Amino acid sequence: MELISNLELFQTVFNSAPNGIAVLKSLYDNKDKVEDFSILLFNSCIINWIDNKDYKGKRFSTIFSKIEGTNILEQFIETAETGITANFEQWYGDENGKQCFGFTVVKQDEMLVVTMEDVTEKKHAETALNNALIDAEKQKRLYDSILNGTPDLVYVFDRDYKFAYANKALLSMWGKTAEDSIGRGLIENGYEDWHAEMHEKEIDTVISERKPIRGTVSFPHAELGRRIYDYIFVPVFNEKGEVEFVAGTTRDITESKQAEEKLQQSENRFRKMIHQTPAPTLVLRGDNLVIEQINKHMLQMIGRGEEIIGMRLIDVLPELEGQYVWEQVLKVYNEGIPFDQSEVLVPHNRTGELKDYYYNLAYRPLIEDGEITGMIQVAVEVTQQVVARQKMEESESRFRALVNASSDLVYRMDADWMIMQNLEGEGGLSNSGERGINWLDKFIHTTDLRQAVDLISKSIVEKSIFEMEHKAVNEDDSVRWVFSRVVPILDDQEKIIEWFGASSDITSQKELQNVITESEEKFRQLADLIPQIIWTADPDGFVDYYNSRWYEYTGFEEHEFGDSSWISKLHPDDVYLVSKRWYESVRAEFPYQIEFRLRNANTGEYRWFLSKALPIRDKEGVLTNWFGTCTDIHEQKSTTEKLEILVADRTKELQRSNEDLQQFAHVASHDLKEPVRKIKTFLSRLEEHMEEQLDESSSKYIERIHVAADRMFNMIDGVLAYSKMNADSQKTTIVDLNEVIKNIENDLEIALQEANGKIYFEELPVIEGASVLLYQLFYNLINNSIKFAQENIPPQINITATEQIEAGNKVAIITVEDNGIGFDLDQTGRIFETFTRLNSKDRYEGTGLGLSLCKKIAERHGGSITATGISNKGAIFIITLPFVQKAKDI
């Protein structure tokens, strides 16, 4: 205490110490336990370390904030409480740099005297020494492998001419074991007298002259017979510089010529190796570092061709001059020191623009006759990896931000599933911040405990991700559903060191899932009670559900088929049209309806079905799935065929009646025009006569009479045209539908310009038919598309065509699609009826006869016309016309 009171002397003593010395005073908590230390004195060594002179009276854990995660403070507290001196070493620091310190902690009264020694270099030296020992052991194994793996004869003589060592090749040549050979002389090991005498003299010469000798000798091999060998004896010196042993190597040179050839082949292989190695490689020669060899990978990397061979590297890449990488190239060549470094930044011009690239570089000097004559360069580009790591580091920061923003409970656990740290997020779960609690006790309801233990055991054994939906108990004893996902973190030995997990509250999802499951089950039960086949499909048209009726009829295993397997059950004649119509509906998102035949698995017969499907949309109008039915209409179709016979009989009667009706319509139309014409004439005279006497109301009434009379006149013309359709026969000719559409486009030019409309068509077929009638057919359809356009939306009319075979005849399927006001699906059956109007006559002009005429024209050509549409989304008309007419008059 007297020494401490003389602070100046004490501080001088402190500051003279080569190691760090600190004097600390214990700080106690409310339970009289040591929790930290107050700093009394630091010597200069510690002050220089922490770079903080304002330390006195502050807590040790505050000044040395990086001790968190170490046991330094705990060791100090143990010495303060027990009085037992502590000696330990501990690494201290963060990712920016770590040092290892040796601590000696001594308790003196109520104080601790701590000596701190920086042993980082010592630790590094120990590590280097251990590594050197490991390398030395590897080197020994390498030498043993080389000596015993080489075909050369390697051996050692002691000064008495006895063998002290013989490798496997020599023992094999003798046909002896090491026990039978080592310690024995030349003659004892089978050498002839002259041979033994010659080698003994050579051994004496090596010992006396202290230098190697070389020679050639011929002697027998145990298996190969007599061979010629080249040998060399060299002295082996002990630590005193005396020749202790004579080592020798002998090589079979019988095949010397082959050896020379192999040497040449080796040179060629070296060149091939340079060119075939997957890493970008080049060889430089001479003081100017001229490119002697370069493989295609290096050429591609620097963006040049083989014309650079023979050029100086600095001339090829002048931007390297002055850069760090060029300094290393010169250093390797001038000093012969290999250079290896990863992720070296090299700005250079590869694509016409100077950019930054990163490479793993390896430079090796080429040494010939003891002199450096060039160097080999290997450069592997790692720009993507470096950029990826940088992005990963950025991703780490984003990850922490994401965790902080997450609504899930995120946590870390040790290898035994003990919670070490709750990160951020609540997830609707209890999060008291407890540590050291078993995860099972914290999160798993007793009813799920067995399953959780089994899954955890499996994850531990397989080092796999744990995933589980389970119940958890909150602090208020309420039960909630939780989804937990826990990922194992492995060390470089593939050992689990900790677990990273997240748990999210899925109670609402589970409740909704239960409701959906119950709803789906009720739907399936109801669907199985319906006599029709019920099916659903995803937005792309792939069937994902059938009711039991489908499996009963087709014989498929339940849930075995759910894609387009239904095609295999169709009648071959129906496959093309059904598939085309279905995928057209899927693509256009229009309702689907068609008749086709399906094969019964039990009877093998084909029965007729009517299939309908509607697109199901969400509240935003997005297609979510399709709901469809298939109804057996085989009996109705059979009845229809019988009715067709009756219809044929009645047709003759109706034909005569129709001719009478057509004549009547023709006469009536002409007779009706006369009174309408008189109404128009006398109405005009009345206007002229009372021109100055008519008030505004009277003028309106007269105008309405004019409009009604004009409409009546148009109606009479329509009836006349409709009646003449069946009365007048037309000669068939070859009709190019492309020309027909072009003529219509010219005739409707003004209407198209006023509406800003467009007609798109190409590659329409050339067919037989009545040119006038086909013109009228497409004129009415295109005119309707212009007339029934949506307000402020220019009409777009697309006309496409395909071909197919129906009942052995080639037919054209022509589709006319527009983006007009369309019509509701339930109006499809009325749209071709005579005088049918689907829209207000005050807003859209017309007689209601246009589409009826279209239907008659298509039928007179032996074809058909159908329509489908969606209100405010447009209409599609599909016309089927044969390529060849059966009669010349239609």
Image (cartoon, rainbow, N blue to C red):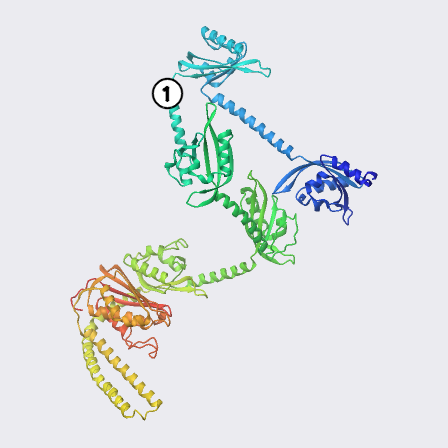
Above or below, 536 against 85 in this view is below
Q: Residue furthest right?
A: 2
In depth, the one of 132 and 580 nearer the eye is 132
Examine the rendering and report whether any part of residue 279 can be seen. Answer: no
Which residue is disc 1 drawn over? 258
In depth, the one of 51 and 642 nearer the eye is 51
Examine the rendering and report whether any part of residue 375 can be seen. Answer: yes
- Residue at (62%, 31%) from the top-left corner? 125
Quarter of the picture holding the N terminus: top right
Determine whether, in the image, residue 8 is placed left or right of residue 143: right
Q: How many marks?
A: 1
Quarter of the picture holding the C terminus: bottom left
Above or below, 182 against 845 in this view is above
Q: Quadrant of residue 760?
A: bottom left
- Percent position of residue 401, x then y: 57, 53
- Percent position of residue 445, x then y: 61, 53
- Percent position of residue 77, x then y: 74, 42
Q: Secondary structure at mark 1?
A: helix
- Percent position of residue 128, x then y: 60, 31
Which class describes the residues within 10 Å of circle 1: few (<14), some (14-19), or many (20+)? few
- Disc 1 residue type? Gln
Above or below, 560 against 84 in this view is below
In depth, the one of 264 and 636 nearer the eye is 264
In depth, the one of 441 and 490 nearer the eye is 490
Determine whether, in the image, residue 285 is placed left or right of residue 8: left
